[in-house]
Structures are given as C-alpha cells and as structure tokens.
Image (spheres, rainbow, N blue to C red):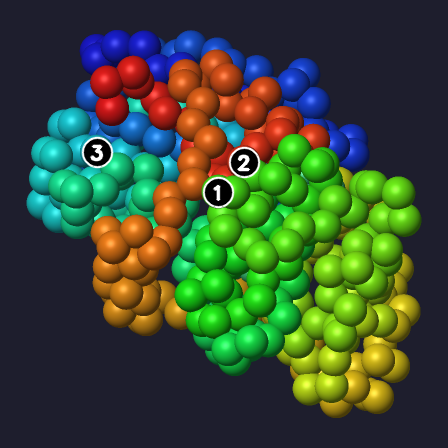
Amino acid sequence: MTVGTNRRVLLAARPQGAPRESDFQCVAAEMRPPDDGEFLLRNRYISLDAGFRQWMNEGAGDGYLEAMQLGEPVMGLVLGQVEQSKHPDYAVGDWLMCRSRWEEWSLADGSDYMSKLEVDPELSPSCYLGVLGPTGLTGYFGLRDIGKVQPGETVLISTAAGAVGSVAAQIAKLRGGRVVGMTSTDEKCRWLVDSVGVDAAINYRAEGGLEAGLVEQCPDGVDVFFDNVGGATLDTVMAHLRERARVVLSGALSTYNSSEPVPGPYNMFKLITQRALMQGFMVTDYVEEYPAALAEMAAWLKSGELRNLEDVVVGIENTGPAFCRMFQGGNRGKLVVRLEESA
Ligand SMILES: NC(=O)c1ccc[n+]([C@@H]2O[C@H](COP(=O)([O-])OP(=O)(O)OC[C@H]3O[C@@H](n4cnc5c(N)ncnc54)[C@H](OP(=O)(O)O)[C@@H]3O)[C@@H](O)[C@H]2O)c1
C-alpha cells in the first residue's frame, strides 16, 4: 500500500570542485504508510548548509555524518511535522528538526538525530533552521566563548552576508563591537550595512583585495576574527591581528570544494607576537545550553534587536540549484527551501 508520491533529491554525481546542478537529481517515489514503531513526517523546510558539501566527497565520513552515498538522497537538516504516527513518542502535529534527507516526506523511527521543537506562534517555523537553529547558535557560542567581544573592539566576520555570518555580525553588534563584514560584491556590501547593520563592509574581490580592505576598514587591526572561510583569507587576516586578538574558527568554506589537502595558513607566527588565540568549535558542543541561548535570542528577535534574514526558495525541485547558488555567493542570509506554498 502507498500513501502518495514522495519527491526527493539524489546525489547523482560527487561534485568536482563547486557543486553543479547536474550533481543533483530530483525523482519521485511511492511512499508506504508507517509500520509499528514508525511515523511519517511531512517535511516543511530544508536547511541548506554550506558545511554539508564536505560529506558529498568520497570517504568523507566523520563523527558527525557519514559520507553521502551516490544515488541516495542528499543529507541535510530538515524541519518537518508528524503527519501519521505509530510511535508512542511522536504525536501527529509534533514539529521535529532532523538530520535527514532532501525529500518531501520522511519515514522515521526516531533513531536518526532529531529534536522536538516548541514552535513559537509569533515566529516563522523556518527561524528554527536559521537564526534560532544551529546557524544562529554557531554565531552565539563562537562569539561568547572564543570571541569574547568587548565594547568598542573591532570584530571582523567572513561570509558576513551568509547564514552564520549574518547572525554573528548582528550578535557582535549587540555585544558592543565595531563590526566589519566581508563579502564578494559591492551590492552585498550595501546589504550588509543596510540589512545586517554592520559598521563597515569589505568587498574582498575589489581592487586591492582583502588586504586593501583591511587597511582601509580596520586601520588599527582586528580584535576578533569570526572566520567561516579559512585558507588564504585566514592567512591575510592573521597579519592584521591586534595584541590579544581572538580568532574564532567556525568554518573553512574555501577548502570544502577541494579534494586535495589545502596548505597554510602561513602567518602562524603572528599568533605568537600578538599573544593571540585561535580556536575552533562545533555548535553541537553546546547542546545542553541551547534552551537558555535560544530564549535570549528569541527575546532579541521579538524586540527587533536581532533580524531573521532568510533567503527562501520554494519547491523540492529547486533544492539542488539553490545549494549550488550558495557556492557562487548568491544567497543573502539563511538559505532555506520551503516545501509547500501554504507553510
Ligand atoms: N562550527 C560549527 O559548528 C558550524 C556550524 C554551522 C556552520 N558552520 C560554518 O559556517 C560557514 C558558513 O556556512 P553557511 O551554511 O552559513 O553558508 P553561507 O555563509 O550562508 O553561504 C556560503 C557563503 O560563503 C561564501 N562562499 C561560497 N563559496 C566560497 C568559497 N569557495 N570560498 C569562500 N567563500 C565562499 C559566499 O559568500 P560571499 O559572497 O560573501 O563570499 C556564500 O554566500 C561554513 O564554513 C560552515 O561550515 C560552522
């Protein structure tokens, strides 16, 4: 017996370099109803996260996720609602955030990573993938525990117009920092100033590149660097660290499309002469602190101190193209796919 058609997106080819639309294939399959101990989720939103690109590579598995399988649905974070249940712990209508598949419907038994959400009726459910999800929490904890922003300090954020970066930039402002955001076009620089609220923006592709931008916008150096990019970007910024600077290693986007080890950074000696700290972290280190952090962030959202900056794409068939667009810098804020018009 089937309960309808489920459209899903398969990993048709392992991306070579930046992902291309032909790496993904949207197909339709029949869905069976849940067996005892299972439930059926109607997926409402798919979160597109740049970090998931790494697990599209052959043999890329680590403690967080196994390498995705060719010909199988692409893995990602998904927000869904229970539609049918034969599982005692999951009731019809429950909202769940799951590490799941790019698909319209999911059969589950609760063994995959998933957490129940109390969706605040005053907020869009998609907030829980973005500003009130792992994305926003990455900015929150990285700045709180490693960045430790003090009022008046210069805080530099890479991919500031992206999902993690745009929340980190707003929180750095709330903590009293003078915030400088980096991005790839003049138009995105304007968006950073007007919509994210940074004090200054650097177009790292403009003449003179990042180096010239840092000289102009951070003339006294950088106190806190929240880095989502790594590689040459990190190297360039390290030469501009102030004494006692903190470098928050959030991500290494510049390396995700590379199948070979990426060298560098070379400016490590700057950490010594500037007595600087550089530390990585995973947002999942903080699971037990999520409720308190989310309460604070939800209050900021409702008071208007924090904005939910989303780039919403509609329809499962647009998931692969949207993911590719992110690697061309095409998104503003958190990229999410909405799976039905009425959600
Ligand atoms: N540590 C953690 O627990 C944690 C959790 C979640 C995410 N992260 C990290 O946060 C970072 C941002 O992820 P996101 O999902 O929020 O993506 P995002 O910033 O919304 O989108 C990616 C942005 O990165 C820039 N970009 C794309 N390809 C690039 C490349 N090859 N080199 C340099 N920049 C590139 C583009 O912005 P521009 O046009 O501005 O260049 C693009 O808009 C990732 O490194 C991710 O791994 C870390």
Question: Quadrant location of the N terminus?
Answer: top left
Q: Secondary structure at mark 2?
A: loop
Q: Are marks 1 and 2 in contact (CB under 8 Å)?
A: yes
* Label 2 CA crowd tier, 10 Å (few <14, some 14–19, many 20+): many
Q: Residue at x 62, y 30 (%)?
A: 330
As drawn, the label of residue 195 is: 1
**In the image, which is nearer the foreground, mark 1 or mark 2?**
1
| CA distance for labels 3 and 2 | 27 Å
Q: Amino acid at mark 2?
A: Arg
Q: Secondary structure at mark 1?
A: helix
Residue 123, horizontal then vertical, whole percent: 22, 42
Residue on which disc 2 sits? 332
| CA distance for labels 1 and 2 | 10 Å
The part of the image, by quadrant, that contains residue 84 is top left
In this view, 315 is above or below 17: above
Please state the total of marks drawn on the protein image: 3
| CA distance for labels 3 and 1 | 31 Å
In the picture provided, is 94 more to the left or to the right than 198? left
Residue 323, horizontal then vertical, whole percent: 58, 29
Q: Residue at x 13, y 48 (%)?
A: 89
